[in-house]
Amino acid sequence: MAQEIARRVEELRSQIRRHDHLYYIENQPEVTDQRYDELFTELKTLEKEHPELVTPDSPTQRVAGRPLGEFATIRHSIPMLSVDNTYNAEELRAFDERVRKQLDVSDYDYVVELKIDGLAVSLRYENGVLATGATRGDGEVGDDVTTNIRTIRSIPLRLHDGETVPTVLEVRGEVYMPTKSFVALNEARAESGEPAFANPRNAAAGSLKLLDARITATRNLSFFAYAIGEISQPLAQDHWHTLQRLRHFGLPVNPNVQRARDIGEVIEICMGWADRRETLDYQIDGMVIKVNRYDQRDILGATGRAPRWCIAYKFPAERAQTVVESIAVQVGKTGALTPVANLQPVRLAGTTVKRASLHNFDEMQRLDVRPGDAVLIEKAGEIIPQVVEVRKELRPQGAEPFAVPKRCPHCGTEVVKDEAYVYVRCPNPDCYGQLKERLRYFAGRDQMDIEHLGVALIEQLIEAGLVRTFADLYRIRREDLLALERMGEKSAQNVLKAIEASKTRPLWRFLAALGIRHVGGQSAVVLADHFGSLDAVMNATQEELQAIDQVGPVMAESIYQYFRTSRHRVVIDDLLAAGVRPQPPEPKKQTGNLQGKTVVITGTLKTFSRQQAEQAVREAGGKTSSSVSKKTDFVIAGEDPGSKLQKARDLGVEVLDEERFKELLAGKET
């Protein structure tokens, strides 16, 4: 029986890995989401019933259960150099002349890649299993973001074709955020009072540097491999064939990589993508051109900061001129009024733009944007249109400044300015505009995650008088939905099923969904992990809140006041009465035997992956480092420990084997 269960677990893992590869890398899914969920649930159940079968590369182990205290650091075995930039064809030809002169031959070719607008990382695979993931950092040392890297579904935890994978394989590449995810994330942040990310690169970097992998897992990050670092045995003699091997191992390699025989073809490829980049579902800000053969790269070498065999071609920023036909005012879930410019339609970066954000009324007045003005617009991160300049010399006679509203455009209530005098707000909690946005936010993917409950359906529910509060969502009946326009039996069932499933969301999601000012997803996780229950959060004093790391005085006051407002208490009581039961976070281990200790792990451990061992150190109160120094308290040495073991001995640092490490974690003193 035990053998049958173990065999079934491996079969499920193999199927799930295959479906992940087809979905996230090949974009050719073979099964429905429902069938995938069934396989995943079966595996998760079997592993829960038989924890001895859990392995670090299992698909169920992608998301860590609790946040880190801080990031450890990793020293790159081979430095991650930066790349010099060019901005036109003449500079590309000058680069080619330098290559030709130094190689003193004409027999060389190039590989041309898209320059993904993301964050460079290095992934280390040991015996085909993902061991660590690190940011580029300063090129020499980066942050250990393994727990977050593991949440990225396009990154395999175990490589295919294990027999041919090198014992050590470092893969360099780019973590990025797809366009749709970037837009959705900024919308959610704006609604929760958090500043928007300026571009997808900042969004990807911010998401990868979160201390809680559970939040990172919701950000839908992705990855492309584009180079190798340390490797125990060569894959190929040139870059082009190395990329093919990486793809063979199951790593995502950008499908648009091209070979070019000479600089003329390079320029043609670069100019072609300048016109086609809007067809991609992710952002690029240029192209990267690399000499293909490794032996020729060795001849070319590098400067102190960048290789001489590689150059980036950066696309120029794209702007468009149009006319502001009118200025509209939107009302958000917190009552904030936001001006939006309605534009004469204009093509920009491959799309037709009709509206542009003016951010707030102070920004609108700073730019002095008026209806009728000719304006220049560009896309922030090439996604969100915004007005960047007013062509005042083209302003028509009689163009009047747009007056800041004195009353809410939805309910007519007199508006007020917030404490920072940046936002104008509608103070009416029953405002239709606020209600619609609050419900949309509450049901959003990063909050209660209620599928099938979009803006159109929310508007129908409000107009039909079925929903006035969050709790009303949980009282909707099948017949209520069927009475709505364009609502069939199957759709009604899907909505009700999704609402029911949201009743037992984690506490942090519930806190985030309430729409407390200044509290986003990450802050909600911090609160949930610190207090452990809804009652504890609600009854916390302002001093207790402010004492929490990552909770400042403004946020503390906002949380404190929220839970002491009677109508908010009524909302929460109503939700609980409707059957919503926020689930508390899993309790943290309280071993603490490594409290305040700095630990270095070297070599291969038998019962821990590198990431699991480091997580165990942190849970025991310690922190990990990638290098041995006089400040190191312990070195944990596995098989093939390398030079770190000798350095520990030279410095007199205590060395523990794996068994002693496990005893220490179990509570036995050193």
Image: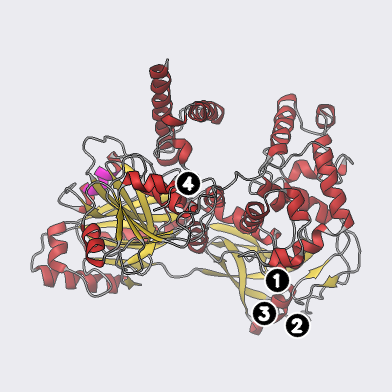
Query: Is residue 255 visible in this depiction of the protein?
Result: no
- Real-space Cα separation, disc 3 to disc 4, in angstroms: 41 Å
Q: Please, what is the dominant secondary structure of the magenta stretch?
A: helix
Q: What kind of element bears circle 3?
A: helix
> Is there a contact, CB below 8 Å, between mark 3 and mark 4?
no
Give coordinates of residue 295: x percent, y percent: 12, 59
The residue at which mark 2 appears reads as: 397
- Callout 4 crowding tier (Cα within 10 Å): few <14, some 14–19, many ≥20: many
- Residue 553: mark in rendering: 1
Foreground tag (1 vs 4): 1
- Callout 3 crowding tier (Cα within 10 Å): few <14, some 14–19, many ≥20: some
Q: Is residue 29 left or right of residue 136?
A: right
Q: Residue furthest left?
A: 104
The residue at which mark 3 appears reads as: 367
Range of residues picked out in magenta: 242-246
Q: Is residue 169 left or right of residue 608?
A: left
Q: Earlier in the sequence, mark 2 or mark 3?
A: 3
Foreground tag (3 vs 4): 4
